[in-house]
Image: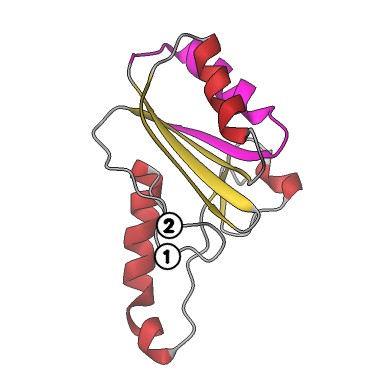
């Protein structure tokens, strides 16, 4: 039985499933880069899983925000107008203050990381993730605590 699935080229059907983690695709195309690719990819994947930072992805932009231990929300989404406004609006509805944030795009895709100030309980956390996930064009939402 598969309880969790991790993939680097998600499609719209799989990305919305529970227990699926979409990651940036990290690739290598020369013999020189392949030599250390496994170590580099493992380190960068670990950094993504622990902090949300993306480096050297093929399908997403480089996005780095120093992780200082606050709760962090990461959102993979289409690069369309008013996406950031809709995302931050969901936080405002729950009276959540943004401590820091970054948004970067690469072609038709974008990635947003938001650090939040105040603590939130599990119910509000689930509501925020659910509400942001419902925004048209959002493909994945993750809370790092």
Image height of 31 relative to 134, above or below: below
Quick check: 35 left or right of 86?
left
Instruction: Provide the residue designation for mark 2.
Output: 62
Residue 98, image x and y in percent? Answer: 39, 22
**Quadrant the N terminus occupies:** top right
Q: Do the residues labelled 1 and 2 touch (CB within 8 Å)?
A: yes
Left or right? Give the position of 32 relative to 82: left
Left-right relation of 73 to 19: left
Q: Nearer the viewer, residue 27 or 5?
A: 27
Above or below, 90 relative to 31 = above
Could you tell me which residue is drawn at 32 percent across and 78 percent down? 36
Magenta residues? 118-145
Give SS at disc 1: loop
Q: Which residue is drawn at 61% across and 26% down?
A: 86
Report the front residue among 55 and 127: 55
- Residue that extends furthest to the left in the rendered view of this protein: 68
Give the image location of residue 3, x and y in percent. 58, 41
The reply, left or right, for residue 109 in relation to residue 122 is right
- Mark 1 or mark 2, whichever is nearer to me: 2
Q: Where is residue 63 in the image (x, y as percent from the top left)?
A: 41, 51
Q: Mark 1 points at which residue?
A: 56
Residue 33 within the magenta-colored segment of the rendering: no
């Amino acid at each position: 039985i598969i309880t969790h699935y991790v993939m680097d080229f998600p499609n719209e059907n799989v990305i919305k499933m529970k227990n699926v983690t979409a990651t940036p695709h990290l690739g290598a195309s020369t013999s020189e880069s392949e030599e250390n690719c496994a170590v580099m990819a493992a380190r960068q994947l670990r950094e993504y899983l622990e902090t949300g930072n993306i480096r050297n992805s093929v399908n997403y932009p480089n996005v780095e925000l120093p992780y200082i231990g606050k709760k962090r929300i990461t959102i993979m989404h289409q690069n369309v107008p008013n996406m950031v406004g809709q995302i931050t609006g969901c936080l405002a509805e729950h009276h959540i203050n943004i401590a820091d944030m970054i948004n970067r795009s690469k072609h038709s895709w974008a990635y947003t990381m938001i650090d939040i100030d105040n603590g939130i309980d599990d119910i509000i956390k689930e509501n925020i993730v659910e509400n942001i996930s419902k925004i048209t064009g959002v493909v994945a939402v993750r809370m790092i605590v």
